[in-house]
Image (tube, rainbow, N blue to C red):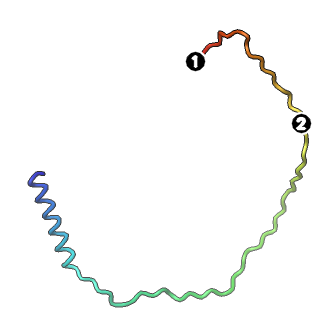
């Protein structure tokens, strides 16, 4: 390592240590959550007119497919 890098790391460490010991924070009062009361209330009401859906079953005949491979063995290969 270069001397400048080592010196910068040493100075940063000294500043961090001094900073930690220079600040002294003491808690002077305990924290408390506020008192909350809940009274009554009302949910909204809605009137909705919706359409109806009717589901039925139906049988449909689908035409079949017949595949005949070529008789020649000279099929192009990839």
Between discs 2 and 1, the one toward the N terminus: 2
Residue 4 point in image, percent of width and height: 10, 55
Position of 39 compared to 49: left or right?
Answer: left
Which residue is label 2 attached to? 60
Q: Residue at x 89, y 52 (%)?
A: 54
**Distance from label 2 to label 1 (Cα)?**
39 Å
Q: Residue at x 90, y 48 (%)?
A: 56
Q: Nearer the viewer, mark 2 or mark 1?
A: 1
Q: Above or below — where is 34 with respect to 2?
A: below
Kindly indicate the quadrant of the structure image that contains residue 31. bottom left
Q: Residue at x 81, y 22 (%)?
A: 66
Residue situated in front as seen by the camera: 40 or 62: 62
Position of 38 compared to 9: left or right?
Answer: right
- Circle 1: is it few (<14), some (14-19), or many (20+) Cα within 10 Å? few
Residue 27 point in image, percent of width and height: 32, 87
- Circle 2: is it few (<14), some (14-19), or many (20+) Cα within 10 Å? few
Q: Residue at x 72, y 76 (%)?
A: 43
Which residue is label 1 attached to? 78
Say how many tags the image has: 2
Q: Above or below — where is 49 with respect to 35?
A: above
Residue 74 point in image, percent of width and height: 65, 9
Labelled pair 2, 1 in contact (Cβ < 8 Å): no
Residue 6 point in image, percent of width and height: 12, 57
């Amino acid at each position: 390592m270069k001397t400048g890098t080592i010196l910068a790391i040493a100075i940063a460490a000294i500043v961090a240590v001094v900073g930690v010991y220079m600040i002294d924070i003491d808690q002077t009062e305990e924290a408390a959550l506020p008192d909350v009361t809940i009274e009554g209330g009302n949910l909204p009401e809605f009137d909705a007119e919706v359409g109806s859906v009717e589901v039925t079953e139906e049988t449909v005949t689908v035409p079949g497919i017949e595949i005949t491979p070529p008789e020649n063995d000279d099929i192009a290969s990839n």
